Amino acid sequence: MSVLRPAFNILVVCGCWMPSSCRTSHGKLFYTLHTTFVILLLYSFCVSQLLNVILNVNTADELSDSLYMFIASVLSCCKIFALLINRKAIGVLSRQLEKEPCKPLDTQEITVQKKFDRSIG
């Protein structure tokens, strides 16, 4: 997957995208465990933020700060959940970006593609 490689590398580290090097059943098992661990950490952080909103708020400023953090953590949980559900569709889309008509055809388009690949990654 040469398209969007930096973004996919970040997703691999976060446990949301299985790398192409995980071909064996042991590699897939370990990566699934890694994904599960990362997701559990994220959801436990979200629960702790909810408990912070419920139990530790004394002033309006603390309430606004705690709610802001809680909403941000809930949104990241929702984004990760949506990403994990749509993993196959994202893979299909990224493969389509490497085919016609998105693939660079002549040397000028290849030069432009390489220039922008260097600027983002």
Image: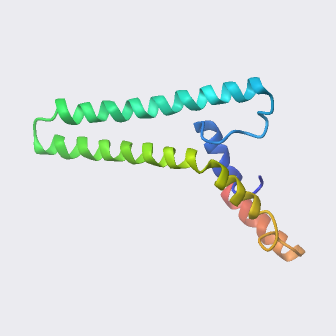
Identify which residue, 107 or 96, lies in the foreground: 96
Q: How is the image coloured?
A: rainbow
Query: 80 left or right of 17?
Result: left
Rendered residue at 28%/47% (across/down)? 68
User: Horizontal and vertical percent for residue 77?
Assistant: 43, 42
Query: 94 left or right of 75?
Result: right
Query: 91 left or right of 60?
Result: right
Identify which residue, 77 or 110, lies in the foreground: 77
Q: Give the total number of marks visible in the rendering.
A: 0
Rendered residue at 55%/29% (across/down)? 36
User: Horizontal and vertical percent for residue 82?
Assistant: 51, 49
Tell me which corner region of the image, top left, top right, bottom left or bottom right, holds residue 2: bottom right
Tell me which corner region of the image, top left, top right, bottom left or bottom right, holds residue 55: top left
On-image quarter of the C terminus: bottom right
Residue projecting furthest to the right: 107
User: Horizontal and vertical percent for residue 120?
Assistant: 66, 58
